[in-house]
Amino acid sequence: MRILTTAMLLLALVTVEAAAQTRHYWIVFRNKGVSSSLLKNSQSLGITNRALKRRAKSLPPDRLIDEYDLPISESALSQIKQTGVKIRTVSRWLNAVSVEASSQQLQILNALPIVSQSEPVVQFKRSQPQPRLESPASSLGKKSSAMGLDYGYSETQLTNIKVVDLHAIGVNGAGVLIGMLDDGFNNYRTHVALKNIQVIATHDFIHNIDDVSIQPWEDTTSPGQGNHGAGTLSAIGGFDNGHMIGAAFGASFLLAKTEMDSSGSGIDFNSEEDTYVAGLEWAERLGADITSSSLGYKEFLSTPTYTSSDMNGKTTKVAQAAVIAARKGVLVVTAMGNDGYISGKGDQSQRADTTLDSPADADSIISVGATSSDGELAAFSGCGPTADGRIKPEVVAQGMGVYWADGASTTDYNIVAGTSCSTPLVAGAAALILSAHPQLTNMQVRDALMKTTIQREDGTSETAVYPNNYYGYGFINAFAAALSLGPVFSNVPMVTVLDSQLIVSTFIVSKSGILNDSSFLYYRIDGSAFNRVHLQATNSPNEYKAIISLFSSVSSVAGYFSLCDSAGVSSSYPSTDSLLQLFTRKTTLPQKYALLQNYPNPFSFTKGTTIKFDSPNEDVVDFAVFNILGQRVKTIFNGHALIGINIIPYDGTNERGGRIANGIYFARLKTPNSISSIKMLYFK
């Protein structure tokens, strides 16, 4: 306490520098000053059950919570604040805080007995190939899948990495939580491709607020702030049928604003390492399964700085944090950086070694390089090895001609290039694999992606041997990676209630084939013991169906799928402790009419669709399908509604029984006092 008083006296005697002369510093503590007994209480540490469940897949039970999780004591933080400095971020993992302080204040901080050392927070500048704001080239292509998904101009980037093949069997990333670290996420609630994304939490670590959009005070200095993050978010989770679809549009997200866009053009980003560390720790504690970041710390603006010899996965603060996150079971996906330009011309052209950025140098993560749409390595894509000789990148994906949302608008899109464009595609592919096999650890997903790549052979030294420091293990193949880990089940089974039956259908694919009579739906009614029913193959490829008797007394049905493939591998989805909710009966009568969205949607003639509406009484209602011109196509119900849920099947035919044309239709419910409608998408 005497030393602290002396430090306070020193503070009073020195002349405090002007605010413009302050800098940002790491203040590292000797210890955390809190009892290790806190390790027994995850709730008090802010660690979610979801995070513990993820950690349990990788760590022994007695190491789910460790010293890295202990907070820095309030007493220590109070002593730091008493010096008059501003605390920017607090890092449990590094046992440090970052502060904004003058050189005199730094002297006082270093005199505190709780402080071990101080060092500057490294500032950096990252160059980004400029997005090409142009109309999509016809070569980007458009495609509709068997599930009725129209990818628009995002089709090429998803087809190349075989994500479309997983979408076609109903794998969309459901159940996976992805942490995004970027420069903000403009219009994520209003852009047509972003507004339906399930966002669990947001935080701006630059300004310490929860709003991750561009702020009024940022308009002049960085008018492009938040547009890059909106783009990366759309590449993973976006959904605008007919324009663009993200790789894992069924996933959930945590949005962390950690980076400053200094130019407003999307070319240069200025930021500091402390906000990345804080954002990564936050996402891990909230239970993120995967993180995706395009941050690359290489061209630094301050001294002391890191050099190429420091790209060893251990020196930079961001690499240290990435390794800790990986040890706790997070799959960290990050960009290699854009400093790998070829020097020279023709036969004399070559790439420089170790042009990767940090944290791409970290071990046990996935660092991502960029290629053209035909798989040729982009001239700018950063290359390995790391300073300690490890091969980098792990994988590559399309990073040129990538189509994503323009965060400056609510409807527009851009065509962009950079390793920051290939990275979210890889993160999305990883999310699909994890959603198909939720029991996997981060390292198992990483290993599957690396072992099932498409390897380019173009006669150059860069592709002569794999893995290498240009393409890593190769161009990712999400479908092959998922199948390499066993049979793949659809994330979202289709459930239809007809009379006293619950009809459950799902898609299942196995590279070894599925044994006859080996596929089951295990289910339990109202929490009772499990029963099982065979899954029968339908006429549609890879589709299986089961029928459960549904009595009026049943309140809920939950279950999971199980099978044995021809190779003798047994698989289940999701698991006995994480069941699919197949049916829930409403226990209260509706207070007003409500027309619910049809399912499935889009739908086809072979599958049909089911439309439901709630009715508070037995009024006469008119229920019909109309085309986009407002013309009545078919009356599918006219009469007294049932009190409660009304279930109306529709097979995609007109009044004459003929099939309707592909396109958009409207189901309209007309009651004595209201008219409501829903939009449906039909494909033959």
Image: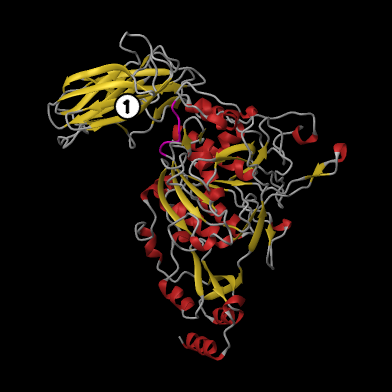
Residue that appears at 40% across and 68% down: 35
Q: Position of residue 371 (x, y in %)?
A: 68, 36
The quadrant of the rendering that contains the C terminus is top left
What x and y, as percent, mark residue 16? 57, 84
Which residue in the protein does label 1 denote?
598
Q: Compared to 485, does 657 lie above or below? A: above
| Magenta stretch holds residue 91 | no
Q: Is residue 548 above or below residue 79?
A: above
Answer left or right for 517 relative to 338.
left
Taking depth in this image into account, of 96 and 274 the one nearest to the observer is 274
Q: Is residue 419 left or right of residue 309?
A: left
Q: Is residue 258 above or below residue 495?
A: below
**Outermost residue toward the left?**
618
Q: Residue at x 41, y 30 (%)?
A: 491
Q: Quadrant of the N terminus?
A: bottom left
The magenta-colored residue range is: 170-175
Pinpoint residue 497: horizontal percent, then vertical percent.
Answer: 25, 22
In this rendered view, identify the residue nearer to me: 157 or 277.
Answer: 157
Q: Is residue 486 visible?
A: no
Q: Nearer the viewer, residue 356 or 215?
A: 215
Q: Position of residue 638 (x, y in %)?
A: 20, 19
Query: What residue sits 48% from the left and 28% below the top?
Result: 167
Looking at the magenta stretch, what is its main secondary structure? loop
What is the quadrant of residue 161 in the picture? top right
